[in-house]
Amino acid sequence: MKNNKILIGILGIIILGIVLFALNLFVGSVRISFDDILKVLLKDSEDKTLNVIIFDYRLPQALTALLAGAALAVAGLLMQTLFRNPLADPSMLGISSGASLGVGVVILLTGAISGAAVSSFGWWSTIGVSLAAFIGAVLVLFVMLAFSARMKNMTTLIIIGLMIAYLAGSITDILKFFSLKEDIHAFVIWGMGSFSGVGNSKMAIFSISIIIGLVASFFLSKNLNILLLGEMYAENLGLNIRKNSVVIILISGYLTAIVTAYCGPIAFVGLAMPHIARFLFKSSDHRLLIPTTMLIGMDMALLCNLIARMPGFDGNLPINAVTAFIGAPVVISVIMKSRK
């Protein structure tokens, strides 16, 4: 009976994801009928405008949202299990702040030195920003890996991650003080998050990178379950705590770095989705939680992208504004129901 409920729940989440993905193709500032969508997807449409809207904008955005939501949700689950902290999320190790600092160096510092807004540099303003975000995130990830290899106390590691985030934020604020208004505006917009920055040109490397991280996370299920029993019991079972912690941080940080580099720092998805998965399936078994959290993350990101692109908005709303608006009440509701 329990297995049937789990299968029904997973099937429901998958169907919801398919519906949301389809709506991401239909809904936008330009209304497109179901028949026209099918013709475009089947390469049976001669309308060049519709082809551009679907293949160059809506389809890449939907795929980016799907992959980014899955990656952040799984990364958040790994962090919450490792630190045994329900408020842990992918940004707590300072990785997102490292990415922001990298982008700050490219946008703010380059503009201040050259005297020209980086947004006027053409291709450098897009490729350079993604590359800088990834480098900044990876550098912080390596620093945290070095600390995690030497420390047993996870609380100390959290504090170090927060201090690194504050340090990166301080340097970024100094860069803002000396920067051009146009560059500050561009930096703020990047920090609000968006699923529109990947596009067809970057989709292959983005999707392959995310899939590699997600597949790697499935191999952690057994060790994550052992960690829930406590460090002492885990060590008695032969689990190398330090080595395991390094691997978990590496995979979670890698997924966070990829998403942040291409989409900006997306908030709340990594924090909220694991809670929803635990509440819906009443389980702490990571063999179930990892795939269900991944699917719920996909659905949430697709929903947020859909709302951000609803007709009536001038362009796209910032994704972070939508994720917080939807996610916060959901998490509060889940926590209150769990207490009852």
Image (tube, grey):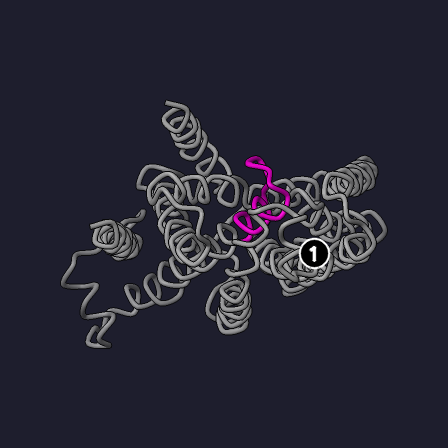
Quadrant for the C terminus, please: top left
Quadrant for residue 37, please give it. bottom left
Q: Which residue is mark 1?
A: 241
- Which of 241 and 280 lies nearest the eye of the viewer? 241
Around disc 1, counting alpha carbons within 10 Å, would you say few (fewer than 14), some (14 to 19), or many (20 or more)? Answer: some
Residue at the extreme front = 236
Q: Residue 73 location, x and y as percent? A: 48, 50
- Look at the numbered disc 1 and give the secondary structure of its residue: helix
Q: Give the total number of marks visible in the rendering.
A: 1
- Main secondary structure of the magenta stretch: helix
Q: Please tell me whether residue 88 belongs to the stretch shown in magenta.
A: yes
Q: Residue at x 70, y 47 (%)?
A: 100
Q: Residue 220 location, x and y as percent? A: 55, 62
Q: Residue 219 location, x and y as percent? A: 52, 67
- Give the amino acid type for the residue marked by disc 1 in the picture: Ile
Location of residue 340 with respect to 154 vertically, above or below: above
Q: Residue at x 73, y 38 (%)?
A: 155
Looking at the image, can residue 53 be seen? Answer: yes
Q: Is residue 234 left or right of residue 39?
A: right
- Which of 150 and 130 lies nearest the eye of the viewer? 150
Looking at the image, can residue 176 be seen? Answer: no
Q: Residue 269 location, x and y as percent? A: 48, 44
- Which segment is the magenta one? 75-89
Q: Is residue 225 left or right of residue 43?
A: right
Q: Residue at x 62, y 48 (%)?
A: 82
- Which of 322 and 314 lies nearest the eye of the viewer? 322
Residue at the extreme right = 113
Quadrant for residue 205, please give it. bottom right
Q: Is residue 20 left or right of residue 331?
A: left
Q: Please tell me whether residue 216 belongs to the stretch shown in magenta.
A: no
Residue at the extreme left = 35
Quadrant for residue 235, please give it. bottom right
